[in-house]
Amino acid sequence: MRRLLPSLALGVLLAACGKPAPSAVAGPAASGGQTPAKVKAGFIYVGPVGDYGWSNAHEQARRALQKKFPWLESVIVESVPEADSSRIIDRLVSEQKCDIVFTTSFGYMDATLAAGKRHPGKKFMHCSGFKRDANVGTYFAELYQMYYLNGLMAGALSKSGQAGYVAAHPIPEVVRHINAFALGMKEANPKAQVHVKWLYSWYDPAKAKEAAESLVSEGCDALAFTEDSPAVIQVAEERMKQGQPVYAFSHYSPMQKFGENSVVSGQLVDWGILYEEVLLRVYTGIWDNRDWFWMAREGAALLGGEFGAPVNPKFIEPLKAKTLNDPILGKISAYDLVLKRLAQMSEPSVLFDPFTGPIQDQKGTLRLKPGERAPLGSLLSVDWFVQNVVGDIPRK
Amino acid sequence: MNASFGLGAETLSRSLAAATPLLLGTLGEITAERSGVLNLGVEGMMAAGAVAGFSAAHATGSPWIGLAAAIGAGAALALVHAFFSVTLKANQIVCGIALTMLGLGISGVWGRAFVGTPLACRFQAVLWSRDPVFYLAVVLTAALSWLLFRTRWGVAVRSVGENPLAADAAGLPVDRIRILCTAFGGAMAGMAGGYLSLVYIPSWIEGMTAGRGWIVIGLTIFAGWKPWKAFAGALLFGGIDVSQYLFQDHCSPNFLKMLPYAATLLALLASGRSLHGASAPPAALAVPYRKGER
């Protein structure tokens, strides 16, 4: 032991001389002067990282970045009730010495803003909110474009023309996604309808399963959903195995493996690409308090039931076999139309948006004039269903 | 007509599936409480059973081994409760709630590796395309009814729960019977959890028990500590759970969401009237028995 110590010390000394200090590696750090050699990021999640949706998706992104960047150190606190968030943010800043704190639930908005005032030297990023401050930015990855594409595929595949949607809460985000799905479905089948069941929960596999079963027994043969578990997909897969075709669209996480025979596609989120951008900006000292609202164009919203496959290969042929008539593109297969729309929405100038008029609500009132694109603000506060949705938005 | 018949049959079939975990858990809790041990840790034991069942079935490819692991995990946690509340005579309510937290915590950590993993193996349907665990639950209901009320063993369990002093005087090993009944209760709660992760929603996700453990405790009172009534109660609650989505187009979802809880209150009100007599709780429920004290 005694002999080991000096050699250990020598080793450390050699290593210190041999390797340049981290700050010297990163160019801007040396020149900028304010850039820390390390960045410590804190993440606050509203759910357990063991859900299979929202919190899990953020955690996957964090873990990937933690591996990728040697200068990044990160800590998480999971299952934080909104009422406790203020205390947890303070702990991450004061005890953990985080340089930046990401608060990943809408309900953390005011607590994040207040923390920004208390800790002017630190940075904060609030997910899905709309309030900013000098040191508080906001970010979100929005998926309505992918819901529209899923609706297109549902409309092309469904025999009954009836799709079911298992919905979490009657809030604008979910209403927007249902609308986008219904618009896509209508494009493939003008008579198609979308039936909605409400769960009043972001996460309740048993309830989601029962709601999906109800929809199927009422005649729906395509299922989409907003709920953080694969329960709805398992319902479709069971039916598929019994010989009754029910198509499912995966939500948020790669759930295709829960339904190889029934999952056509789905929407996926890549928080990693957004976190990487924000953290690099912190590291290089050019962070600012902007609002990051990322979709297909930025690569945060992806199509597919698993990463790397926009459409389950099993359904490519059936989708190619279905010919649609597009007013601009003419005769085109459903599969080609999906890929075309995806490409258009991924263009820097976003050549296509699902919420383009004429769009009528359930009562037949014209909400968007022909050719008019819905402004982002109206999408973020939408409280009406498009014409081919069956069901009400419960009012408080 | 035919369609509505089909819908009715399907609703009943799904109600039975939703009722199975509730029934399994309630049978276990009835046994434990009949022996005088209140175990509020059902939710935790269920969660542990769910993750143990899933991980064992995933590793071995056999749902039966999964179910056995679920039973074992539930029983192991229940033994913790038995050690504190029976052997050390600690407060059963506090122990039970601690057990819930322990079970939920352990299952969350243990299950982290299985989130997002589909289960490859399933039970073979045995009769009318139902899973074997459902039939096992029915058989267990009958067996437990018979055991508790028609055998010497049942008399021993019930007398330990009603009057441990007299039972002790009659030569019954009070603590040993209570420990065994608590362990059996845990095994059943574990099996209920296994049903969730192996049959009902074949996957593991944290928090998948979603309060069923607490419904089990309500059902135990609702059933008046009788296995057959537990079957009826579990079916009622499963049915409410299943049918609330059928009526959502015609009725406010807020009202429908309230139904299971309203039903609980009504059930308690109804059973409250008969809490004396046949549906009375075991007299020594939640009272630790100390030898030589009165």
Image (tube, coloured by chain):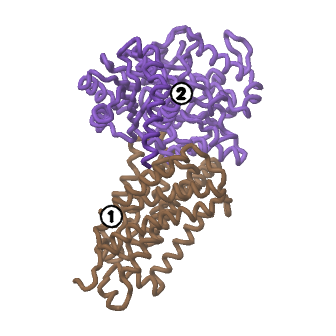
**Rendered colour, chain B:** brown
Which quadrant, please, contains the C terminus of chain A?
top left
Residue B294 to residue B244: above or below = below
Number of residues whose C-alpha sits closer than 10 Å to that of mark 1, classed few (under 14), some (14–19) or many (20 or more):
many
Residue A296 is labelled as: none
Residue A202 to residue B17: above or below = above
Is residue A151 at all visible to an observer of this figure? yes
**Rendered colour, chain A:** purple
* Secondary structure state at the residue bearing disc 2: loop
Residue kind at label 2, given as amino acid type: Asp
Mark 2–mark 1 CB contact (< 8 Å) = no
State the image coordinates of residue A284 (x, y, percent, origin top left).
Answer: 43, 16
Is residue A362 at all visible to an observer of this figure? no
State the image coordinates of residue A321 (x, y, percent, origin top left).
Answer: 77, 26
* Secondary structure state at the residue bearing disc 1: helix
Number of residues whose C-alpha sits closer than 10 Å to that of mark 2, classed few (under 14), some (14–19) or many (20 or more):
many
State the image coordinates of residue A220 (x, y, percent, origin top left).
Answer: 61, 38
Residue kind at label 1, given as amino acid type: Cys
Q: Nearer the viewer, residue A311 or A330?
A: A311
Residue linked to disc 1: B95
Q: Chain of mark 2?
A: A
Q: CA distance from mark 2 to mark 1?
A: 43 Å
Residue linked to disc 2: A270
Name the residue at 29% across, 69% down.
Answer: B90
Q: Nearer the viewer, residue A112 or A65?
A: A65
Residue A363 to residue A160: above or below = above
Name the residue at 52% across, 20% down.
Answer: A295
